[in-house]
Image (tube, rainbow, N blue to C red):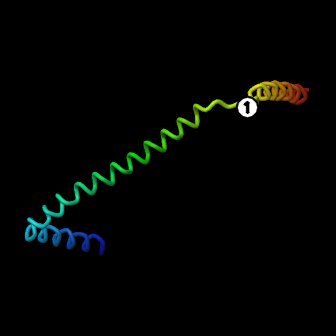
Amino acid sequence: MKTLIGGAVVAALGIIGMSVWWKYFLQFFVGAIPVTLFLGGGLALYLGFDELKDTWKKKEPSFDTSTASDETENTNMKSETETLNAEKSE
């Protein structure tokens, strides 16, 4: 309840303050737009560059032969599973 009353009082003071200092509010608002655009653009550039680096890492060829061993491991796992299932059903 205290938060509700405090919020209402602060909102009323904000409306009164904006009506009294409307010119200064607009001046601040106009000054804040370029700063916000600059910071937002910088953030977008950083995130775009980071994503680009991730795609470069994915495109690099790897000389890993683990795919062949993965296939044999999968075959071994299947045969072990079949053996265990056969033992379990007996």
Left or right position of 69 against 58: right
SS under mark 1: loop
Residue visible at 71% across and 30% down in the picture: 63
x and y percentages locating residue 3 in the rendered image: 30, 72
Total numbered circles: 1
Left or right position of 11 against 71: left
Q: Nearer the viewer, residue 40 or 76?
A: 40
Q: Nearer the viewer, residue 19 or 30?
A: 30
Q: Is residue 84 above or below residue 12?
A: above
Q: Quadrant of the N terminus?
A: bottom left
Crowding at mark 1 (Cα within 10 Å: few <14, some 14-19, many 20+): few
Disc 1: which residue: 64
Label 1 amino acid? Answer: Asp
Q: Is residue 19 above or below residue 34?
A: below
x and y percentages locating residue 53 in the rendered image: 52, 40
Q: Quadrant of the C terminus?
A: top right
Q: Is residue 10 above or below residue 78?
A: below
x and y percentages locating residue 46 in the rendered image: 43, 48
x and y percentages locating residue 56 in the rendered image: 54, 36
Residue visible at 14% across and 63% down in the picture: 27
The answer to which image quadrant residue 22 occupies is bottom left
Q: Nearer the viewer, residue 86 or 70?
A: 70
Residue visible at 58% across and 37% down in the picture: 57
